Amino acid sequence: MKNPIWFIFWLLILIFISFFVAFLGAFFYIFLYMLEACCGCWNGINNFLLKCIQFPHFCAEAMLQCRSPC
């Protein structure tokens, strides 16, 4: 049986942290993605920012599966 405490934990992370992280990641991703076309050195940073943008999706999946963070 899945632990409902993890559901609440991921819900709080989703509401209070992940949207803020995704917003900041998207803001910088838009500008750096244009620079990546000129210089490939931004590729690693853009991959990290893309993961930040996808963080709410990760939290929602973990919430529905009641997955522990470890």
Image (tube, rainbow, N blue to C red):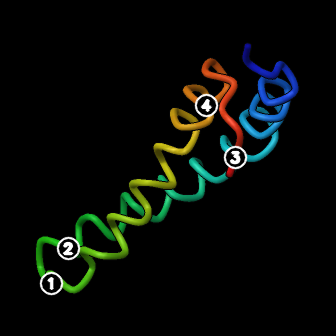
Q: Amino acid at mark 3?
A: Pro
Q: Amino acid at mark 2?
A: Glu
Q: Which residue position holds label 2?
A: 36
User: Marks 4 and 3: CB-CB under 8 Å?
Assistant: yes
Q: Secondary structure at mark 1?
A: loop
Q: Which mark is residue 62?
A: 4
Which mark is in front, 4 or 1? 4
Looking at the rendered structure, the number of numbered marks drawn on it comes to 4
Q: Which mark is residue 8?
A: none
Q: Secondary structure at mark 2?
A: helix
Q: Which mark is residue 39?
A: 1
Which mark is in front, 2 or 4? 4
Q: Secondary structure at mark 3?
A: loop
Q: Which residue position holds label 3?
A: 69
Q: CA distance from mark 4 to mark 1?
A: 35 Å
Q: Position of residue 46 (x, y in %)?
A: 33, 67
Label 2 vs 4, first from the N-terminus: 2
Position of 45 relative to 28 (above/below): below
User: Marks 1 and 2: CB-CB under 8 Å?
Assistant: yes
